[in-house]
Amino acid sequence: MLLYPPIKELLVQVPSRYMLVNMVASRARKLSSEAEVSGEPLEEKAVSLAIREVADGTLTLEQAEAEAAAEAPEEDEA
């Protein structure tokens, strides 16, 4: 169960729970991938780190959307 930060505090920065879950999951995958490539273990679980970033304001919805757009495969125009 998530005790800190409270979900209400996180929802102040992200408009819906669905967006929050997607944003945290995407960031957690990126953190895990970066740690695996560098060979350095994470001091905490990736999801906990991503949630803390949202709570601290270091990860915003705009940043998450920009990262998702950059990672999305480009569609071929017919």
Image (tube, helix red, strand yellow):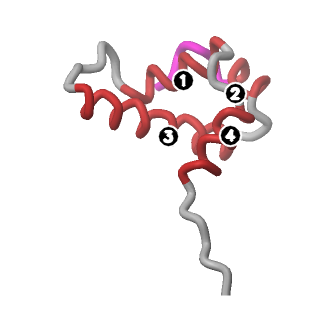
**Residue type of the residue flagged with mark 3:** Ala
First along the sequence among labels 1 and 3: 3
Pointers 3 and 4 in contact (CB under 8 A)? Answer: no
Horizontal relation, residue 25 to residue 70: left or right? left
Q: Nearer the viewer, mark 1 or mark 2?
A: 2
The residue tagged 3 is 25
The residue tagged 2 is 60
Pick the residue in front: 34 or 7: 34
Pointers 4 and 1 in contact (CB under 8 A)? Answer: no
First along the sequence among labels 4 and 1: 4
The residue tagged 4 is 17
Q: Nearer the viewer, mark 3 or mark 4?
A: 3
Look at the image and say whether residue 4 sits in the magenta stretch. yes
First along the sequence among labels 3 and 4: 4
The label shown at residue 51 is 1
Q: Nearer the viewer, mark 4 or mark 1?
A: 1
Mark 1–mark 2 distance (CA, rounded to whole Å): 11 Å
Binning the other alpha carbons within 10 Å of mark 3 as few (below 14), some (14 to 19) or many (20 upward) gives some
Q: Residue furthest bottom?
A: 78
**Residue type of the residue flagged with mark 4:** Arg
Mark 1–mark 3 distance (CA, rounded to whole Å): 9 Å
Q: Percent x, y for residue 21? A: 58, 40
Q: Percent x, y for residue 62? A: 74, 35
Pick the residue in front: 8 or 47: 47
First along the sequence among labels 4 and 2: 4
